[in-house]
Amino acid sequence: MKNQCKFSFFFLLSPCPGSSQEYACYTFPLATSIILSGQYEDDLDNCEDVVYTGQGGNNLRGNKRQIQDQVMKRGNLGLKNCMEQCVPVRVVRGHKCANSYVGKVYTYDGLYKVVNYWAEKGVSGFTVYKFRLKRLEGQPLLTTNQVHFARGRIPNSISEVRGLVCTDISGGLEDIPIPATNLVDDPPVAPSGVKRAEDVVPASDV
């Protein structure tokens, strides 16, 4: 049984000026990750197998319904390119949480491959793009349905955060420190190779 999803979002990757030749063989844009959280009426999600509605054409500020046809550009084109070039996509899911100031918390659920896409008339009668994604094998067991929330004491300082491995991955470059935790590795390992992007220049066709 597939569950109804309501929100979808893309993070796009485009070549930056002066980028290395390792990306020369790819056709851009590419969709690096998507978020499933509840605002597209045509999405279907059973965790391992996702039918994902493309980007655009819905009334995000109103009743969330589709109000015009979608077109093959931006995020839709990014997912199409991922399928044609066998580039996996990261999937993040949102969960309702009354204790969160945004009303949700998010879990990373691994890498998925885009196996098919098509255009069809959606629930509201407008053309939408559908993308079928399947979770790649060999990843840790999916735990998105085992998310639990608990109230706890707010730490008095960053040093009290459980699993803390780095107090600020930005190295002081950001106004607010960005701590990192690691509750997976034993012993815990701090992230390495983190670089701060000074400028983000989107491609002209994105």
Image (cartoon, rainbow, N blue to C red):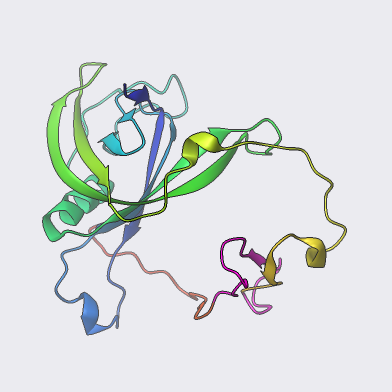
Residue 143 seen anywhere in this rendered image of the structure: yes
Secondary structure character of the magenta stretch overall? loop
The quadrant in which the N terminus is found is: top left
In magenta stretch: residue 52: no
Residue displayed at 67% across by 38% down: 100
Residue displayed at 29% across by 83% down: 18
What's drawn in magenta, residue-wise?
A: 170-191
- Number of numbered discs present? 0
Quarter-of-image position of residue 187: bottom right
Residue displayed at 25% across by 58% down: 30
Q: Position of residue 6 (x, y in %)?
A: 41, 27
Q: Position of residue 74 (x, y in %)?
A: 26, 50
Residue furthest front in the image = 186
Q: Nearer the viewer, residue 121 or 34?
A: 34
Q: Nearer the viewer, residue 69 or 28?
A: 28
The quadrant in which the C terminus is found is: bottom left
Q: Nearer the viewer, residue 61 or 103?
A: 103
In magenta stretch: residue 179: yes
Residue displayed at 45% across by 73% down: 199
